[in-house]
Amino acid sequence: MSGEEEYGVVALAITGDRLGYYVQTHNAGKEEIPQRKQVKLLNVRSPQPTTQRIQPETGEREVVPAEDQYWASREYLRDVAVGKQICIQFVEAGVGNVTIIADDVDLSESIISAGYGFIEEYDKVLSPLAEQAKKLKFGIYNPQSKNIAPKETFLTNFVPDETFECIIEAISSATTYKLTLLPDLIQIRLILEGIQLKEECSKQSQYKIERFTLQRQGTVTLSS
């Protein structure tokens, strides 16, 4: 895998140091759904969301709390990368140097320069960028920045037909979505009314919706 290149389109920022992307191939058919993969940015570690791990001694599941500023870090990468064509130069399986082709932006350099990630080991390019971000108090180094994160809940206090700004976080099917409502960062699940799809159409429809709306910002009107 080391040294291989792959091209794709960024589908979503999973965290501040990990992307999901659709693989681009030259011989794909018009109706073929491209494979979706993940890649971790080379030599970058960002704050992580709440995760679960298994205790090796007991086998019990343990909840690991979210790290400070994980949402801000993810949002930076989402804003910079989602929907962009990328080139990945792999150094090992699932880890690579990711460049936005149109702007020639190295994403590891971008997130370190903005102060939304840490370098994992010394690098002659990234290390000075990290020091500069820390010195200038960018991103997570800014003591004035708020440690905000979304919360998933039932939305009860809203006016029917009220419109919200939102981020489309996940698409379970062509009619079922997970949204983050702005500016309060409330996460809800949404089912579209009045739409039915044949099973053979649903996967293709879901991909087309994901391709142009996943992790984009928009508006939603809630009826009930």
Image (cartoon, grey):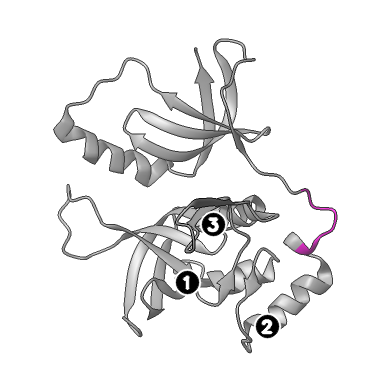
28 horizontally vs 2: left or right: left
What's under tag 1, amino acid-wise? Thr
In space, the residues marked 1 and 3 are separated at their CA atoms by 17 Å
Q: Name the residue under label 2.
A: 127
Q: Position of residue 66 (x, y in %)?
A: 63, 52
The magenta segment: 141-146
In space, the residues marked 3 and 2 are separated at their CA atoms by 21 Å
Picture residue at 61% right of the left edge, 36% below the top: 151
Q: Where is residue 2 in the image (x, y as percent from the top left)?
A: 35, 84
Q: From the image, which quarter does the N terminus lie in?
A: bottom left
Choose top left, top right, bottom left or bottom right for residue 16. bottom right
Q: Mark 1 points at which residue?
A: 99
Q: Mark 3 points at which residue?
A: 15
What's under tag 3, amino acid-wise? Thr
Q: Observer-nearest residue: 77 or 48? A: 48
Does the magenta portion include 97? no
Q: Eyeballing the image, is 209 above or below 45?
A: above
26 horizontally vs 12: left or right: left
